[in-house]
Image: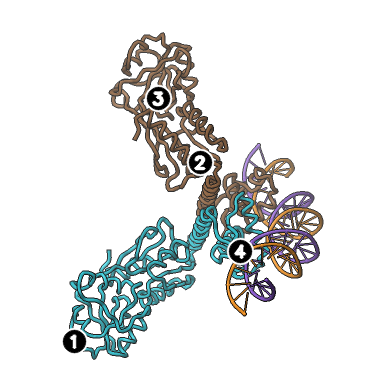
Chain colours: A cyan, B brown, C orange, D purple
Amino acid sequence: MRHMTTLLYIDAVARAGSIRKAAETLSITSTALNRRLLAIEEDLGVPIFERLPRGVRLNSAGELLIHHIRNQISDMDRVRSQIADLAGERRGHITIACSQALLPYLPRQIAAYRREHPGVTFAVFRRDREAAEQALVDHTADLALVFEPIRLAEFQTLLTVRQHVHAMFSRHHPLAARETVRLRECLDYPIALPTRAYGVRHLMEVALADSAISLNPVVESDSFEFLGHQAIAEGIVSFQIPIGLPPGGMLPDMVSRQLDPRDVPSGLIYMGQLRGRILPVAAAKFAEMVQKDLEAQYDCN
Amino acid sequence: MRHMTTLLYIDAVARAGSIRKAAETLSITSTALNRRLLAIEEDLGVPIFERLPRGVRLNSAGELLIHHIRNQISDMDRVRSQIADLAGERRGHITIACSQALLPYLPRQIAAYRREHPGVTFAVFRRDREAAEQALVDHTADLALVFEPIRLAEFQTLLTVRQHVHAMFSRHHPLAARETVRLRECLDYPIALPTRAYGVRHLMEVALADSAISLNPVVESDSFEFLGHQAIAEGIVSFQIPIGLPPGGMLPDMVSRQLDPRDVPSGLIYMGQLRGRILPVAAAKFAEMVQKDLEAQYDCN
DNA sequence: CGAGCCGCTGCAGGAAATGCAGCGGTCAGG
DNA sequence: CCTGACCGCTGCATTTCCTGCAGCGGCTCG
């Protein structure tokens, strides 16, 4: 797309924060890039970037413009994918920002989709619940899948999935004999918890906010994979939501039991997109497929 | 704006229906234009125009693309006007499609607006109620002001103004003594009517649809100005809505009296824009001003 | 059946974008 | 205090791309 190189250049500079850095990622000289910026600013009659000693930063006019540019870029992508669709071939690229808990789930869906549309490529980025929404806003993601998102201003919900917190431990653990477990029972044992940035921890903290009980994890981590291994290795208890537990179990010997809903309320996974945006065909179809799958497996609305 | 010349070229070709014609209006050679089209089609991997013996026409991929292009063009205009606004100077160009009846009203508003923002220019096109909506769709108008529009699919209403039909005649006419007049009384005299394309005529036809009375104008015209002159010159009766009657009266010696609402229902003037579009700052502010003015003078909602 | 359009192409001249080398400025760390 | 690193920006030579001219073949209409 020759006619939008300038737009892509501006976007790159805005992201890189410096002309020379952006030029490097774009495989051109800083001269050329600099000249294009000056040309645009002359066209507009107004500077777009403020020059700092260590680079450049968008000024308010630039903020206005970059919004337009990013919209235009992704809108053009959409049109291209619609046109490709018209020609019979489904092509495209889908970028997804998702909570860590969703990482075990997505690959199966992507594989299923790519079996039918091998021309479609994917990029999946692990983003916490705040960063995921930001990724939608700055167009680094088409779709977001987030557990217990923080604010939903620019977030247009496509689907929500209710998830109860589960305790996970070795199948030799005393609690493994139970169908469901009470939170109190878990706290009789050493526990491993995700950090406060995660929805699971957040739900548990909220549940105990008014009580005298406090969570004293012996191990804390930002990785559920690590927590799972830790739970098995040390024979302690950790927590996760069902979608984060692959069908065969995350690890051999691991079992999970639902926490009694009286103790810890259930949370919601949100699938969503940038408010007001029209998704490319491929992304929309993929979202549709994920939605059907989730609705078949879980409690959705 | 160097980076969108190609887009403007494609738009011009789509409108002109032929490369050579478009090239002429763009003051370039058909060669250059042709090459741009071929380049775009190669980029896209798909033709966007089908070649006919007498020119070119958009194919379905082209229809998809031209929508995107026209959105981008006007969106860019909006961004430019926002940036200009940021710099303190309100600049821009506003195009308005309006019913004939509004033509006497608009100049005062435009004059008032231009007193405060001399940098803003206007283009006003007289369009019947069907063509006005079309003008919004193909981006030849930012705003439309229509009396009794036909369909409102792509039309996003900003304001409606209720208008009663008035009879207009010389102040020497016998009916001039009355406060309001009945339609029946008017029909005792020779009448001059607008053609069926106009809302005033439409309302009157509908009002009489179930009755035995029929409208038999001695003069019919598509010009309210002409009808006014005719009414005075021949001493007969014609019809118009209040907004079409300038404060001092359209002509010396002309008076108007409201038709009894029992006889002819009132109609609505719609001010609107293309659904979903974000107007340039200038157009939005102008619409706001018109809205305030109309709300102060008439019955709006 | 020829006149008039049409879209398209080879070729040459010209305009615009690019890259190289280098300038002046700011900042961090020794 | 100074030195090296990084920044944006500019003069100049080169290359790349775009444009315009002339002309081709195809089609329609009178």
- Residue at the spot 70% in from the left edge and 48% down from the top edge: B29
Do the residues indicated by labels 1 and 3 lie within the same chain of the protein? no
- Numbered disc 4: what chain? A
- Give coordinates of residue A186: x percent, y percent: 22, 82
The answer to whether marks 2 and 4 mark residues whose Cβ atoms lie closer than 8 Å is no
* Quadrant in the rendering for residue B122: top right
Q: Which residue does the numbered mark 2 point to in the structure image?
A: B282
- Residue at the spot 46% in from the left edge and 13% down from the top edge: B232
Q: Is residue A10 left or right of residue D15?
A: left
- Residue at the spot 43% in from the left edge and 30% down from the top edge: B197
Type of amino acid at the residue the image marks with label 2: Ala
Of the residues tagged 1 and 3, which is closer to the observer? 1
Do the residues indicated by labels 1 and 4 lie within the same chain of the protein? yes
Residue B52 in view of the camera: no
Q: CA distance from mark 1 to mark 3?
A: 84 Å
Q: Is residue A274 left or right of residue B125?
A: left
Q: Is residue A123 left or right of residue A207?
A: right
Q: Which residue does the numbered mark 1 point to in the structure image?
A: A177
Badge 2 marks a residue whose secondary structure is helix
Of the residues tagged 4 and 3, which is closer to the observer? 4
* Quadrant in the rendering for residue A153: bottom left
- Give coordinates of residue B124: x percent, y percent: 52, 34
Type of amino acid at the residue the image marks with label 4: Pro
- Numbered disc 1: what chain? A
